[in-house]
Amino acid sequence: MVIDTSNTVKTNTPNSGRAAAAAGNTRADKTQAQAGNQPSNSDDSVALSPEAQNIGRLREAIDNASGVDSERVSAIKQAIAEGRFEINPERLAEAMLAQDELLS
């Protein structure tokens, strides 16, 4: 590989590569910043799907739920580490189906 040290690339030409792209980005950033300072006259709106609304309600319920039972978490961690934690597949399946019904 040969490196050209003569630096013959002119930075003021429109096809000068990265320099032009950087200059273009700077102008675009300034335009966006100016547009952000002006009030918007558009009538944009957002409508959430029923699924998204359900997820939002679930998130609020989680955020408002009481704290974590750290004693129970510690006991489960210890049981897993010792290999005595047993999973009841039927109970797990029922819980998963109940969660699915919440999202439906």
Image: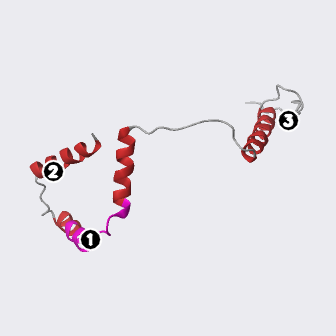
Magenta residues, as a range? Answer: 63-76
Kindly identify which residue carries mark 3: 5
Amino acid type, label 1: Asp
Q: Are marks 3 and 2 in contact (CB under 8 Å)?
A: no
Q: Are marks 1 and 2 in contact (CB under 8 Å)?
A: no
Residue that appears at 12% across and 58% down = 86
In terms of secondary structure, where does tag 3 sit?
A: loop
Q: Which of disc 2 and disc 1 is earlier in sequence?
A: 1
Amino acid type, label 2: Leu
Q: Which of disc 2 and disc 3 is earlier in sequence?
A: 3
Amino acid type, label 3: Thr
Query: Which residue sits furthest bottom?
Result: 71
Residue that appears at 78% across and 30% down = 17
Residue 92 image label: 2
> In the image, which is nearer the foreground, mark 3 or mark 2?
2
Give residue 101's position: percent from left, percent from top.
23, 43
Q: Neighbour class for label 2 at 10 Å: few (<14), some, many (≥20)?
A: few
Quarter-wise, where is residue 24 in the image? Answer: top right
Residue that appears at 24% across and 71% down = 74
Side (left or right) of 69 relative to 85: right
Question: Relative to the observer, which residue lies in front, 14 or 63?
Answer: 63
